[in-house]
Image (spheres, rainbow, N blue to C red):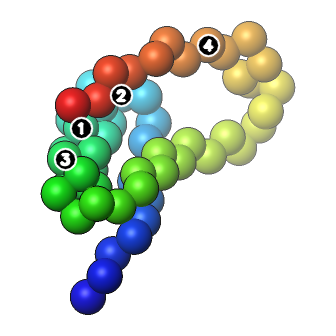
Amino acid sequence: MNIKKVVTPIDFSDNSRLIAESAGYFAGKLGAELYLVFVVQNFEDYSGFFVPHMNMP
């Protein structure tokens, strides 16, 4: 099996950060690209929302 992409949902919680780090680890081991997905239900609620860069191992 040749996995090229890993997709992980996030919600910017502390648990989400741990999941993103784990997904990054596995994607790195597989030589795959990592995609983090956050779904916005109402864009107006997030119009001024800023997400700082997260360093991934």
Q: CA distance from mark 1 to mark 3?
A: 6 Å
Kind of residue at disc 4: Phe
Kind of residue at disc 3: Tyr
- The quarter holding residue 46 reads top right
Residue 12: horizontal and vertical position, in percent?
Answer: 43, 28
Q: Secondary structure at mark 2?
A: loop
Q: Is residue 4 visible?
A: yes
Q: Nearer the viewer, residue 44 or 38?
A: 38
Q: Earlier in the sequence, mark 3 or mark 2?
A: 2
Q: Is residue 15 visible?
A: no
- Please name the residue that numbered disc 3 is placed on: 25
Q: Secondary structure at mark 3?
A: helix
Of circles 2 and 4, the one toward us is 4
How many numbered marks, from 0 up? Answer: 4
- Please name the residue that numbered disc 4 is placed on: 50
- Please name the residue that numbered disc 1 is placed on: 21
Q: Secondary structure at mark 1?
A: helix
